[in-house]
Image (cartoon, coloured by chain):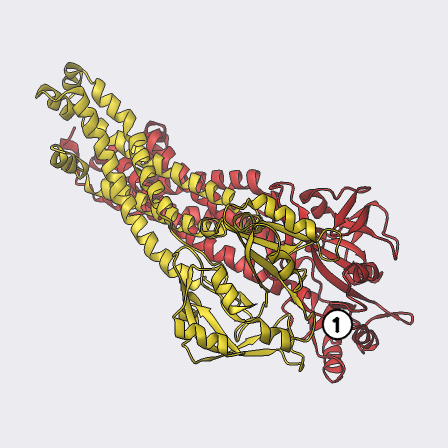
Chain colours: A red, B yellow
Amino acid sequence: MRSLQQVLAVTSLNLRNLPQRMGSSVVAVVGVAAVVLVFAAVLSMAKGFERTMISAGSDDTAIIMRSGSTSELNSGLSNEQVLIVADAPGVLKDGDDSIISAELYVVVDVRKRTSNTDANVPFRGIQPGAFDVRNNVSLIEGRMFEEGKNEIIVGRSAQQEFLGLETGSTIRFGQSEWQVVGAFVAGGSVSESELWTDVRVLQGAYRRGNSFQSVRVKLQNEGSLETLTAALKNDPRIDPDVITEKEYYSGQAEPMTRFIKTIGYPLTILMAVGAVFGALNSMYSSVSVRGKEIATLRALGFGPISVLISTMVESTLLAVVGGVLGGTVAFLVFNGFQVSTLNGASFSQVVFDFAVTPDLLVNGLYVALVIGAFGGLFPAIRAARLPVAQALREL
Amino acid sequence: MKYFRLIWKNAWRKKIRTLLTILSVFVAFLLFALLSGIGYAFKGGVDVADAERLIIIHKVSLINLLPISYQNRVASTDGVESVTHATWFGGYYQDTRNQFPQFPVAPQEYFDMYPEFNIPNEQFEAFKRNRTGAVVGQELADTYGWKVGDRIPIQATIWSRADGGRTWEFDLEGIFSSDDPRGSTALLLFQYDYFEEARAFAKGTVGWYILRLGKGADAVQVARAVDAQFENSPAETKTSTEAAFAQSFMKQYGNIALIVTLILGAVFFTLLLVSGNTMSQSVRERISELAVLKTLGFTDRAVLGIVLSESILIMLMGGLLGLALGWVIIQGLAQKMAGFLPGIFLSPGAISAGIAMMVAAGILAGIFPAFKAMRLSIIDALARA
């Protein structure tokens, strides 16, 4: 009990002295804050990208493409093959009609608002079933395109990120003109980066005859994916890859998130190491400034452990303040910051928001604590071992 | 320089403190080197672009194909010296993770268009003779350990073969290198004739054209003339210089440069704060000594110089070590990432910028303590001690 009182007494004395060591304490705090800021900023990019890609996919929708295709862009299916998929077992039906959407996926150049340069924007031809195979797609503006007409509806993110996609405007791709008649949301998913039109119109405009690139189907139940895969694999007229939409989008997101993480984690570790050096410096100078004070306390009978703990507490506290500061700045500046990038897997733009999530902030705080612990440990040991007589003589 | 010993001794007065400062500077410049090396890749090789080359792509987007018949029409345009083509093959080697560019090309034309690529003559002749031959860049050969004579199967993701297969096998006939260390050679080239004959669809098309300007021809005028020829045809074109093309393509990745700058800014600011604080602390502790120096006849200016030099010296010690290690890591990284992000390179420009930053940071960190030291009145300082 007495030792606990000692620790509390020394620690509170130490903390009340902090304002006198403002300079070096601020340095330590800012150093830690910068690390947490960079950590949260870089990884929020990966988080946001992942969230956008993965929220697009659902487990009860399967996507069928030609085998060996790495994305919709390089797949190809004939009309006959689409009909085979529609009749296959495992596909959910509404009355007599299968819930499917055979789609065409091409890329068009549209100007990006921020850079005013052309970007590859995905342009998708859909069938009416597209709204049933996808979850939470709904129009927020204007109306649906009319079948057979050069009319498009645009995702909300695409509308914000690229030029000339306001409802009511006309946009030209090559020789064809398209009227923007509406805008849609899709739960913040990658679909919102796309332009949609009637698949028949797109086939005509791109001279694709009666061919498609992918078919999305709604599955009846959990076992349906296997039933469907088995049935299609046994059909000699079609050579498909069948995966759930969720799996497809995770695969599409993987190279980019892996890239950001390969850069982000080593970056954080390196910066954290740099911040540990900064914290060590601050704490060593704090101990050397308090040399007389510590020696006096020791001479009065306070034990080395309480001195050690008080120094550790100081360092940890500074780190936590830095961590909170860095996390707050990251949240205020980066959360919801919208960017778009080229996703290599589909060779087209994906619009996404940086996501500074709670778990990122908690991890940032862990990073701060580790820096604080390492930065405080050695100075604390030195403080505890300070030879009393010698330190007092320096008075 | 004659004060070097004094400066050196002063710098190491508190060993741990100086060492820690040097280490944090070291980390900061290691980061600087890594980020600028990676950032360079995002500039998309704009520096290596040849001002005499133009790229012609389909107006709608890069993925739309152009008819092969355009080649002669482009070649006969005023101001065009020569023209060749390439097509995105988009295959992978063994695993979908091993993706790198593969282009079917007309070998002689293509190598004439890119004189920076060097290949031993006998290997090039063998490549031209063999329909199913291929050549790869040195980077790629290193990554996968390929040797001339190897048979390389590439899985197609777009171009299935007329016989229904999706595997294209090539005989490796040669390995080329680039004159310019900044240019990526993570590239596989094979014969367009073979590609044209064996592909299942879209025969008679190519991905894009590359043209070389004639002497004195104006790039903007030639680009306009080319595009005008194909206006209102089913496949309209968009012609731009190689640099503009590379730049606009890399811009598609979004504002990576901004993010890199931001991180660098955070790092630099922190570094300045840490070392500035250390410097001012060490000057504060030495006030009486500086007063003694002045008593001995050191001028104000000499004292200023000594304090500033010490701070720059500390920056340089940490910074140069950091840049050196960064350079080594970038070499390895460029090799490892050649497929995903080609063109990682620590440019001489970045190295000089780094050194300039060290000196600037040294001056900024030392300037206030140094001025304080310079203005010191001897009497006051000695009295305080």
Q: Is residue A229 above or below residue B72?
A: below
The local secondary structure at tag 1 comes to: loop
Q: Give B360 or A4, whichever is nearer the viewer.
A: B360
Q: Quadrant of the C terminus of chain B?
A: top left
Q: Give A146 or B55, whichever is nearer the viewer.
A: B55
Q: Give B347 or B329, whichever is nearer the viewer.
A: B347
Q: Position of residue A353 (x, y in %)?
A: 62, 47
Q: Residue flagged by tag 1: what amino acid is it?
A: Leu
Q: Position of residue A163 (x, y in %)?
A: 70, 42
Q: Is residue A153 above or below residue A251?
A: above
Q: Quadrant of the N terminus of chain B?
A: top left
Q: Which residue is label 1 attached to?
A: A77
Which quarter of the picture shows residue B209?
Answer: bottom right
Q: Is residue B1 visible?
A: yes
Q: Residue at point 50% right, 61% down?
A: B340
Tally of numbered discs: 1
Q: Position of residue B186 (x, y in %)?
A: 46, 64
Q: Classify residue A255 as left or right of residue A202.
A: left
Q: Classify residue B139 as left or right of residue A76.
A: left
- Of all chains, the one bearing label 1 is A
Q: Is residue A297 visible?
A: no
Q: Classify residue A325 as left or right of residue B358.
A: right
At label 1, counting other C-alpha atoms closer than 10 Å, the crowd grade (few under 14, some 14-19, many 20 or more) is many
Q: Position of residue B282 (x, y in %)?
A: 23, 31
Query: Which residue occupies the extreme right position in the image?
Result: A95
Q: Give B154 or A216, whichever is nearer the viewer.
A: B154
